[in-house]
Image (cartoon, helix red, strand yellow):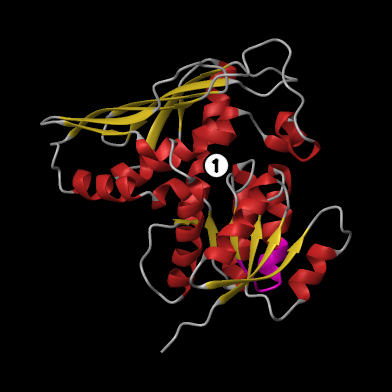
Amino acid sequence: MTQKKLRWAVMGLGLQGNRLVNAITSSRSTKLITTTSEREKGSFVRALKDKKIDAVVIATPNDQHTKQVIAAARAGKHILCEKPLALSIREVRAIAQTVKKNRVRCFVNFHLRMHPEVQKAKKLIAQKKFGDIAYIEMQWSIGGLAQKNLPVLPLHMRWRENIAQAGGGTLVGRSVHLFDLLRFLTGQEVREVRAWSNTTRTTVDRTAIGIFTLRSGVPAVITTSKSIPDADNRIVIYGTKDKLVLRDLFTADPHTMYVAVFDAFADALCGKKTPLATLEDGIAAVAMTEVFIASAKHKRAEIIR
């Protein structure tokens, strides 16, 4: 029996929204019904009322995620939200309550989980092919924003430089992906964070560095930046027997991974097990981000409750 195609609306037509539109049209199991834009007043509300739509992509500025995810859940639509799911633990608790009450599914687009090398690495780590994990390093950085005169961003991307709208710079742009991969690859939660960033009251961070301690006591160092030239972007899992190095996921075309996200979403709704980041995974990433910000601000270690 052929699986019915999942019918989507995409909210937000910036760079990322358009990427996800292209992924939906390439997916074997999805169909694009409509797109909505903040500039088109009432378009999101109309999409939520449309019975032909099964699920909604939220690809708007970060500060709008909470209200839009909640609105979609109340309308009975399943949700794929761009990371971060929200900007605070208080917000994600409201999301979780509404999603549960309305019996819909909500996933977060941590697309790097879909990379074949990540899938393979997770299995090898679980099988202890490299022994017990002793130490982890993760870096995903770019150069180009270190200069004093920053390039003028396109209008639809300027919100990324606004702390209130974005919630951070490289921290919410790249670090959250690595926060998620740390949990996904190891199968462990994080216990403690010691963080540094160069954010100010008026500017988002360009560089964010954290030392994370897993529940097992294993330390992990995560570095992301928009101003480190020629960075050695990689994930290294040091085991007691050998080490595992991942590099390809940072240079891979994300389109294939986005398509895999939508295919996995449809599979998950059919009860199949997938590597998709669940609502709980999204909440964990927000918790790690919130504690990271607190640690950097107060210049002390912070415990994740």
Disc 1 designates what residue? 286
What residue do we see at 49% from left, 47% from top? Answer: 254
Q: Is residue 144 shown to the viewer in this render?
A: yes
What residue do we see at 69% from left, 52% from top? Answer: 66
Is 179 magenta? The answer is: no
What residue do we see at 36% from left, 37% from top? Answer: 248
Residue range corresponding to the magenta coloring: 71-78
**Residue 179: where, in percent of width, then height?**
44, 37
Instruction: Name the image quarter holding the N terminus.
Output: bottom left
Q: Where on the picture, by quarter, is residue 61?
A: top right
Per the image, label 1 sits on a secondary structure element best described as: helix
What residue do we see at 62% from left, 13% from top? Answer: 146
**Residue 268: where, in percent of width, then height?**
44, 69
Residue positioned most to the bottom: 1
Is 76 magenta? The answer is: yes
Q: Is residue 261 above or below residue 47?
A: above
